[in-house]
Amino acid sequence: MGQRALEHRRLVPRRRLGVLRRLWVLLPISLMIFLLLEAAPGDPLGQIPLTLPPEVADAMRGALGVGEPWPLRYALWLKQFFWTEPLHWAGLAPDAPRIVSYQSRAPVFDVIAQRLPQTLWVLGLAYLLGIALAVGIGMAAGWRPGGWLDRLCSAAAMLGWSLPTFLTGLVLIWAFAIRLGWLPSVYDTTLRVRDGSSLAQQMRQMAMPVAVLALYNAAQLGLVLRAALLEQRPQDYVRTARAKGMSPRRVLWHMLRNALAPLVTTIALGLPGVFAGAIITEQLFRINGLGQLLIGAVQANDLPMVMTLCFLSAVLIVLCNLVADIACRWLDPRLG
């Protein structure tokens, strides 16, 4: 017992150091994103009329801060992101200068907060549904490998994983919106759920974008779970459980518990990829979420908005990596 406690004491500082290293890597990531956007072609004032007097254009550039040296603009963005914005949301610095969008002249985080609920509704429901379908597909395919159910589920999963989301979305729009007329092809972001009728309308317009993302995620995660279950089949504990007369359902349950580590890792690390896929899905179904916001900001050369959204994606990747690491160590203490 004393030896185990001593090992735990040695591991805790090492784990904390690993967490700090992963968080510190966000600083060079932010610099790389800023430099890439700085080197990209485009001008936030490229759409202004050519007849505009040069002094007016220079004044507009000065108001946007475009003429400042890039190290100064990068340092200002860091200060506003890590210091001013948290203080503002805590109510401690309501009048401090914040990160402002070139396009809308509104604070970037206020615009993101307005668009975030639409993205979270679609992505959250799609990911949860995809995980539920993946568990069913993986268990059905991995329990009796080589059987007809395994071949059917594996073929369906490979097809769902290989098809791009925009193609799946176009097929669903053609089938259920154009041919059958059952579902709307355009997402109404102004809809507010107040009664049963508006709730039914909300579910109808969410059906296709949620299905597109859920099918893709279910295919990927289902194949991962199937492979993990196949790795557990030849293990000694499975043969022992069967020799003792344990029911197939209980044996499958024990196999599933030991196969969760790769599935949880894929779920956590795949979450940022779901946001990337949502960019295409939101464009396809006209969902006024973060994907549409990023595309519009790129087209308008809105550097503060693009920089903030890309860096938030990097933060999400690092946090999901940490969650996956912690979850795997909790599921399998042997990982230390």
Image (spheres, helix red, strand yellow):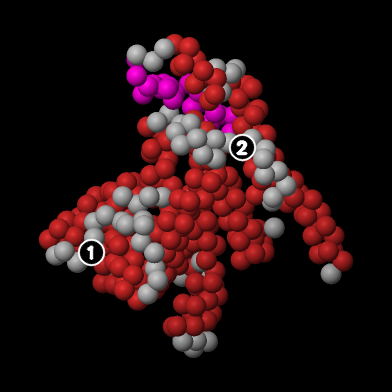
The answer to the question of whether label 1 and label 2 lie on touching residues, with beta carbons closer than 8 A, is no
| Magenta stretch in the rendered image | 25-50
Residue 110, percent from left and from top: 53, 46
Q: Secondary structure at mark 2?
A: loop
Could one spot residue 128 in this view of the protein?
A: yes
Q: Is residue 116 magenta?
A: no
Q: Which mark is residue 183?
A: 1
Residue 279, percent from left and from top: 38, 46
Residue found at x 45% / y 50%: 115
Horizontally, residue 44 falls left or right of residue 166, namely right
Circle nearer the N terminus (1, 2): 2
Residue 118 image-quadrant placement:
bottom left
Horizontally, residue 87 falls left or right of residue 306, namely right
Amino acid type assigned to the residue bearing label 1 in the image: Leu
- Nearest the viewer among 23 and 114 is 114
Residue found at x 58% / y 56%: 324
Residue 136 image-quadrant placement:
bottom left
- Nearest the viewer among 10 and 18 is 18
Quarter of the image that includes the C terminus: bottom right
- Mark 2 crowd level (few <14, some 14–19, many ≥20, 10 Å Cα): many
Mark 1 vs mark 2: in front: 2
Amino acid type assigned to the residue bearing label 2 in the image: Arg
Residue found at x 52% / y 50%: 113
Residue 230, percent from left and from top: 43, 66
Q: Which mark is residue 98?
A: 2
Q: Is residue 132 above or below residue 42?
A: below
Q: How much space separates mark 1 and mark 2, taking CA atoms?
A: 41 Å
Quarter of the image that includes the N terminus: bottom right
